[in-house]
């Protein structure tokens, strides 16, 4: 990227997009996105579920445009007894 543009002109979003485009295949990103959408707590501990949620979230953050949507998606994946 340095050879194409001066470092001071990069925004974080531009750098991240270029980096992911070059080093992270879109196929793998799509798989992580699908795992995020299908994620349910099941028999995981709450801590494990939360970790996995945040790991997958970075690949599908546009499905949760604000903090309220993020909390709702996290809550909706919890086991029924914990949702209440």
Image (tube, grey):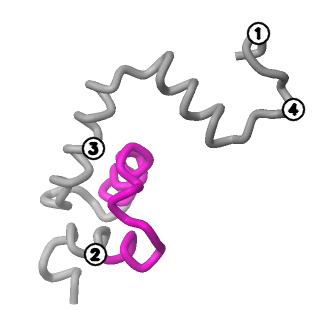
- Horizontal and vertical percent position of residue 54: 42, 53
Q: Is residue 79 left or right of residue 12?
A: left
Which callout, 4 or 2, points to the residue nearer the camera?
4
The secondary structure that dominates the magenta segment is helix
Q: Mark 1: which secondary structure?
A: loop
Q: Residue at x 38, y 75 (%)?
A: 71
- Report the residue marked by disc 4: 8
Q: Residue furthest top?
A: 3
Magenta-drawn segment? 48-72
- Horizontal and vertical percent position of residue 78: 21, 71
Q: CA distance from mark 3 to mark 4?
A: 31 Å
Q: Mark 3: which secondary structure?
A: helix
Q: Mark 2: which secondary structure?
A: helix
- Report the residue marked by disc 2: 75
Q: Mark 4: which secondary structure?
A: helix
Q: CA distance from mark 4 to mark 2?
A: 40 Å
Q: Residue at x 75, y 34 (%)?
A: 10
Other residues around mark 3 within 10 Å, as few (<14) / some (14–19) / many (≥20) = some
Looking at the image, tell me whether mark 3 or mark 4 is earlier in sequence order. Answer: 4
Contact check, label 4 and label 2, Cβ < 8 Å:
no
Identify which residue, 75 or 8, lies in the foreground. 8
Q: Is residue 21 left or right of residue 11?
A: left
Q: Quadrant of residue 72?
A: bottom left
Q: Quadrant of the C terminus?
A: bottom left
The reply to whether the magenta stretch includes residue 10 is no
Q: Quadrant of residue 82?
A: bottom left
State whether residue 56 is above or below residue 61.
above
- Report the residue marked by disc 1: 3
Looking at the image, tell me whether mark 3 or mark 1 is earlier in sequence order. Answer: 1
Looking at the image, tell me whether mark 3 or mark 2 is earlier in sequence order. Answer: 3
State whether residue 5 is above or below residue 65.
above
Number of numbered discs on residues:
4
């Amino acid at each position: 990227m340095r050879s194409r543009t001066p470092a001071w002109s990069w925004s974080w979003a531009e750098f991240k997009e270029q980096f992911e485009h070059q080093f992270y295949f879109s196929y793998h990103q799509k798989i992580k996105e699908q795992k995020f959408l299908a994620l349910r707590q099941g028999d995981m501990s709450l801590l494990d579920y939360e970790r996995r949620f945040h790991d997958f979230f970075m690949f599908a953050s546009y499905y949760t445009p604000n903090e309220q949507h993020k909390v709702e998606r996290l809550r909706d994946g919890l086991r029924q007894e914990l949702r209440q």
